[in-house]
Amino acid sequence: MADDLFEKLPDAGGETYDGSAIEVLEGLEPVRRRPGMYIGGTDERALHHLAAEVLDNAMDEAVAGHASRIEVTLGEGNTLTIADNGRGIPIDEHPKFPGKSALEVILTTLHSGGKFSGKAYATSGGLHGVGVSVVNALSSHTRVEVARNKELYALEFSRGHATGKLKKIGSTPNRRGTTVTFTPDTEIFGNQKFRPARLFKLARSKAYLFAGVEIRWKCDASLASEDAPEEAVFQFPGGLADHLAEQIGTRECVTSEAFAGSQDFPGENKGRAEWAIGWPLYSDGAYSWYCNTIPTHDGGTHEQGLRSALTKGIRAFGELVGQKKAKDITADDVITGSEIMLSVFLPDPQFQSQTKDRLTSSEAARLVENAVRDHFDHFLSDNMDRGKALLMHTMERMEERLRRKAEREVKRKTATNARKLRLPGKLTDCSGEGSGETELFIVEGDSAGGSAKQARNRKTQAILPIRGKILNVASATAEKIRANAEIADLILALGCGTRKDCDPENLRYDRIIIMTDADVDGAHIATLLMTFFFQEMSEIVRGGHLYLAQPPLYRLTSGSTSAYARDDEHRAELEKTVFKGKKVEVSRFKGLGEMNPQQLRETTMDPDTRGLLRITLPPEFEQRAVVKDLVDRLMGRNPEHRFNFIQNRAGELDPDMIDA
């Protein structure tokens, strides 16, 4: 009977799945197939990432002490040239690739370069050996000229392939270094062009980050503007301190002098930190973080080290001058409204991704904290008036923070105790009597809600279960939104109003945490909730009150050792590190409701052991408009926009993930 059933199965299109169906991508073909994996996409930001990759290589030569000058030239036809007077890329035959020069290997092979062992570079921005080869792969034409030993060599490429052999051009007694000229491929980037002003700003920022380098900027006359002149020369002996002084300008500050300095790391780290911090009055603040001259826009462990040094330093100074309340100062009290620039140099930094937006090296926090702390202590105590001025400014922010928190507590307690505020029946509120900040967990389903109620801290954590997928507010009418019971309950629980009436001061909780299952359905529910907050309570998002919980998907156990993994990538990492060489038992959580309260508390709800992602909005109006456009396209009424988005981004997906 079973055989008959199998015989009746239809032929799925007549195609066979055998060895011939398995593709093997060679050379730089993976880069052209999946550019998003290497440069984060194919948009304008990714296009300019190409420029940053080549410029970073030149900066590495300067930081290593081999180059003193870099030239950045933007020409017609979207062609960019970056030259340095460093050692020049080696042009001799590579021992593992007979018949090929080291130059050709570096430009055509992923994970090739001189920055893996640390012998050629003590610190560098390029770590994975993919930067310049990725640029080459995504350029319709690339030409590299190398001046070594008073001889000039050249090699040209097209879309990652050498178009000929390495040519010896002739003698060049007064020239040394590497010159890279490339034109981004329109097959990858369409009609997007380099923005002169953006490149000009990039070149200028690099000069600030290393005082010993001179960067020369040139731009074709047809591309020049007020924001990007035809020619300019950047060299800043004061480094970040010069940059900060220019950024603050004539604005009045809390202290007459900025807190600026640098410090080499001890021992064999061969790294250092440089910083410049000012506290302008009436400022929203601005933060710039760098590692090995590369902007780490999302901060990371070096940021954590600086925050810790400043917090401990100002608390200690408060104790020194007899200000007992200083013990309650937090890092946000110290840095909110400040202008901060931090640059670190590390021999083997770890980043969150190839685009290096966040530093994850664990040792960076300790190194930066130790490097900055002594200098900050001296900055405060060497001039007591200056130290007291900064302390009072910080304490004013602390007292304002505590005042607002107390007001929220009074409003919430009054509403809870007197029952004058109508609250949804499914809300399990907190008592608000704890010392920690209050949190509302929005959870998916009654089962997860029950587990969360048992796992919570009753004093500070409230639970609001929702049933399934809430209404998509981006494609619903105002009447339909008002009539939706789940949304009505959520609005009542938060107590801050919606749209133009949304007032963060009336928010009944310090944090709103979306806690859904670690699967596709959970991600969809979280997306719908984020859309709701973006459209109906944008001020809450802008104020930094919205978070995403990160519950685990797997539990790994080997003997007495157990660990939790957020996703497949994290699981693979744990299997290679914590459980390397061990037999591992893996259990997959189908949902939050399947976790016992102890597991849920330990992995997702306990502030000491959990991880949260804060959902924020860009401060600049133009960037917020871009976010709104994206939300409208992905969540709005027109399905064609979603179809086009999926179609355009489908090429960036990992085939293994699709099969899964």
Image: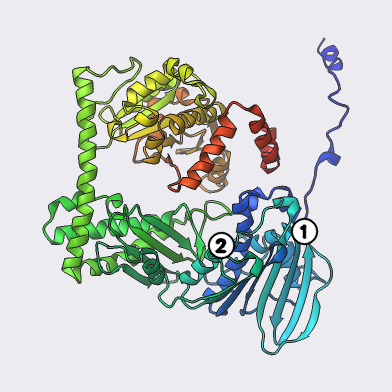
Q: CA distance from mark 2 to mark 1?
A: 27 Å
User: What's the residue at 80%, 81% (across, down)?
Assistant: 168
Quadrant position of the N terminus in the picture: top right
Up the image or down, 176 lies above or below 184; here it is below
**Which quadrant of the figure has residue 247?**
bottom left
Q: Return the x and y of residue 473 as percentages of the image width and height.
A: 50, 25
Residue 231 lies left or right of residue 621; in this view the side is right
> In the image as oriented, which residue stretches furthest toward the left?
322
> Badge 2 is on which residue?
197
Of mark 2 and mark 1, the one earlier in the sequence is 1
Location of residue 102 in the rendering, given as x and y in whole percent from the top left corner? 73, 72
Q: Residue at x 80, y 74 (%)?
A: 166
Residue 432 position within the rendered picture, expressed as x and y whole percent measured from the top left: 23, 29
- Tell me the residue at 53%/43% (across/down): 626
The answer to whether 616 is drawn above or below residue 111 in the figure is above
User: Residue tagged by mark 1?
Assistant: 159
Q: Amino acid at mark 2?
A: Ala
